Image (cartoon, rainbow, N blue to C red):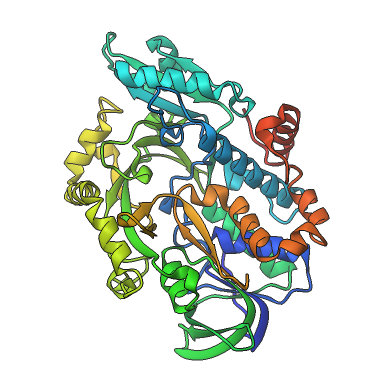
Amino acid sequence: MTLLPHNQPKPKYDIALIGGGIMSATLATLLHEFEPTLDIAIFERLGSFAQESSGAWNNAGTGHSAFCELNYTPEQEDGSIDISKAEKIAQQFEVSKQFWAYLADKNYIDEPKDFITSCPHMSLVFGEKDADFLQKRHTALTKSHLFKGMEFSMNHEKISEWIPLIMSRRKSNEVIAATKMNIGTDVNFGTLTQKMAHHLLETSSVEVFLYHEVKDIDPREEGDWELDIKDRMHSHRQQILADFVFIGAGGYALPLLESSDIEESDGYGGFPVSGEWLVSYNKELIEKHHAKVYTQASVDAPPMSVPHLDLRVIDGKKALLFGPFAGFSTKFLKEGSYLDLPESVNFKNIRSLFGAWWHNLPLTSYLIRQVAMTKFQRMAHLREFVKDARDEDWEVKVAGQRVQIIKKDAVDGGKLEFGTEVVVNKRRNIASLLGASPGASTSVQAMITVLEKCFPEKMQGEWRNKLLEIIPSYGQNLSENPELTEKIRNYTKEKLELEY
């Protein structure tokens, strides 16, 4: 889908959104639904939407619902399983599905199967200790109706029915345990973002400027913002004004946030992590694997490096994906500069950066080992999943670039955060999204959080009825409401044409 930008930005906008990914597209769509008269502009430095973290091959495409991600359910010191984060993320993905279902129902986007397909989510572990953990996790999760229907098995025959490719040539005495949730999904966030962008361009007043890079954000005495924008096609610079700014620029959000000089940005740093996948298009293998299968991360590995073997459906074509293998680059974006990391260091965050590095030396060592891995070594990891994997069936594909948050910490100087965070100034007229996981899956909740923090009166006032039309469960706790959960899931299943 080719998107044509408007000719030239106007001098002033009500809302300026930086970045053409899933976050900005979601926020622009919500704002336009709430108040169609708002003057909104989106600035994207590349030639199309969803070319960085939202791109299909730049993320795993897992509709993160906490069905299979073991790091969302930590084991406590007393042996109990904490499911609070899992319940939170499961509810956030239900919010995303409601928003997408609304877009489909209004015919703002067509053919939901282009971007979302049903795909069981599974957890798989090896050995007595991890099998015991998985069983306790299953017991804890299934007490919540959000995880109703989750199956658990240690029976080789049963697990072979679920994932024959992985179970082939397994020894009968090998201890294996698995859980399975049939209502999991595979999501092409790139296609979804493109569909939303097409709707904004064709049927809304939102203006989109491709090949336009925001270089600087400066506060004005009047209280609004001046954005320095470079037209990368014509090497032209201009300044525009905006009453409200959202920075949804992926890894590049951090330096833009720092350029705004708001005190809330003090102490933040970024730790860039890249990745690679092993990918197979072999139809014989694909026929034997219809699931996303996550296992435990290795010691010292960051959460986004949890090994998983996934079915992917991208542009109607099926593939298998294994990884990710972590890497390191000083770029903050896949299409960024190697100077991004060094140029982000300043007096306000150097203590945070050093503290985070010093207290995460094992992570640094892990990344060095990962970067040095050959395809032969990566295939050896894959063979822990697929015993008879052949080199010729798999190719290496570069994944997207992520920037993990580094925050000030009174004890250690700085600490590494692996979630996402919304940063808002005191005047509530600039907001930025920092971090990575679970990212795109919870984009709708993240943007609602931005709106709640920046426009609280409108969210509780004139925008509320429209919000409830878009997100029927808004303001309610699905974990405490089985009837509403079932109603919502049936609604989104129908509108998004899911099959489970």
Q: Looking at the image, which residue is at 25% across and 48% down?
A: 363
Q: Total number of numbered labels?
A: 0
> Could you tell whether 28 is left or right of 179 in the image?
right
Q: Is residue 144 above or below residue 429?
A: above
Report which quarter residue 125 is drawn in.
top left
**Residue 432's spot in the image, x, y percent?**
53, 66
Give above or below for 145 relative to 321: above
Q: Residue at x 40, y 28 (%)?
A: 75
**Residue 217 in view (yes/no):** yes
Image spot of residue 95 (x, y percent): 65, 45
x and y percentages locating residue 16 in the rendered image: 61, 75
Quadrant for the N terminus, please: bottom right
Q: Is residue 56 above or below residue 376?
A: below
The percent position of residue 17, horizontal first and vertical second, equals 59, 71
Considering the image in quadrants, where does the C terminus appear? top right
Instruction: Judge by depth and name the residue closer to the eye, 487 or 201.
Output: 487
Q: Is 309 placed above or below 327 here?
A: above
In this rendering, position of residue 148 left or right of residue 495:
left
Q: Is residue 162 in sight in this rendering?
A: no
Q: Nearer the viewer, residue 373 or 140?
A: 140
Name the side, left or right, on which 318 lies relative to 393. Answer: right
